[in-house]
Amino acid sequence: MISWKLSVDFNKQKHLFFQKLHMNYIIETYLCSCGCKEFIIKYPNQKINYTCKKCKNKIFYNANEAYSFSKYLKQHSSKLTFQYDIKYSLNTISSSYITYIPTDIDFMANKIIFSKKIVYTITLNKNGTINEIYLIQFPQKIKNILEQNLISFIEKNNIFNIPKHNSKLTLSKIQFFLKNPHLKECEFYYWSDVNYLKYKNITIKEALAMISNYPKTKSVKKAVYQNYISQMQTYKSYNPLFVKPFCKTIKDTNILVDLLNLDFDVSKFKLDSESIEIFILFLKQYYSEKQILKLFKESINYAIYIEDTIFELLFNINNMNQHFQKVPCKIITIHDEFVRCQSVIQYEKIKDKTLSYTQQELQACKSIDKYEVKLPRNGNELYIWANRLHNCMASYFFSIKAHKTIIYGFFQNSILQFVVEISDGKIIQSSSKNNNKLSAIEEKVLSNWYNLYYNSFIAK
């Protein structure tokens, strides 16, 4: 506690002679941190050099200046004494960082009246919304304590009916279950997406049944549950990325179980379940479920191939159906066939169109370490590049033409070896044939070229 000095007008204070006796006096109150309190009556302009009779303290802070509290706080926050406070109502709970300022005197009770000043507060509403208000910046540790006070109060008093957690309860977990009150088990917090779980009340078991299309056979139910347990143990989260489309599209129970038992690292995929479902349904027009199982088994460690292949399909699925020619049911061959189809489609749109570049972009076409760097000058040339590397480069034509992105090709002996895409001066992606990553030597060549030529020319 700090020591305060508070000055008040005698005539405005409630006392035995209130409104009966008017005197031109100021009452100056000294409240020392040692607990000593003294009232002194003086003339308005009278100067007093007060010293606490008990502890000899001479330093007292002017409480009248603190009436403009926000301004006072910015100047004197280091002098104030703060404490923590919790306030709970039916729909909200607030955790606050507060201080008390003397603002008045009750002479009838012989006490000083303090006003509570909230300087930092975090409010959590029943709908999961958090509001944060502070008058000045405070260290992060203050915010951490305020949040922990909220959590502890909710946990201790069982407020808002948050599911019991085996692990440490956090503010984000509390928010999650306030926003999703129909989810009745703590493990839902670790699901990648729960937006499709709109039941009034739902458990993990019921959610898994819904995701897997309410399977009738025990073997499928067991495989779905084992997939869930495996993900939770391995990745500490659950994403039914492949479970949903497999269960929705595959009819053969044994094949479905085998697919569900595949250990996909879902964290490596940027796809959604609906896209995978479209891909499987497309494949089923040409291949058996047994062949599709073999495809996914062989491609389990090639997330980039699965993603890129599906993106190729989704880019123009109507024309893909028109141009697709059956090839061996392998992810690489299907990917290449999708690229071919896309290239045929793109070629008709871009074959007669030219590309233009800035002088700086053209200046980066330099030879480096036995590689010759080039830019595609027209749609036909970009189409040839795409065929050489078996990728979807041709689909970038209109982005290049609109100067939203740019693709450089690296040649050896007039043969394209790899390409790099650059947007806003930054390397977005690079790849060699079949979207393979660059070799260590190629990475070094690209890095040297980018630093020596591209960056320096663009910087100018």
Image: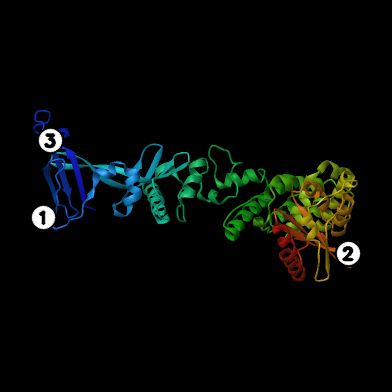
Q: Residue under circle 2?
A: 415
Q: Secondary structure at mark 3?
A: loop
Q: Nearer the viewer, residue 213 or 236?
A: 236
| Left or right of residue 231, residue 157 in this image | left
| Colour theme | rainbow
Residue 301 makes an appearance in the image: no
Residue at image x 76%, y 45%? 278
Q: Residue under circle 1?
A: 53
Residue 131 makes an appearance in the image: yes
| Left or right of residue 378, residue 133 in this image | left
Q: Secondary structure at mark 1?
A: loop
Report x, y in % for residue 358.
78, 52
Report x, y in % for residue 135.
38, 45
Q: CA distance from mark 3 to mark 1?
A: 27 Å
- Which quadrant is home to the C terminus? bottom right
Question: Which callout, 2 or 3, points at the residue further toward the start of the chain?
Answer: 3
Question: Which callout, 3 or 1, points at the residue further toward the start of the chain?
Answer: 3
Disc 2 crowd rating (10 Å Cα; few below 14, some 14-19, many 20+) is few
Q: Secondary structure at mark 2?
A: strand
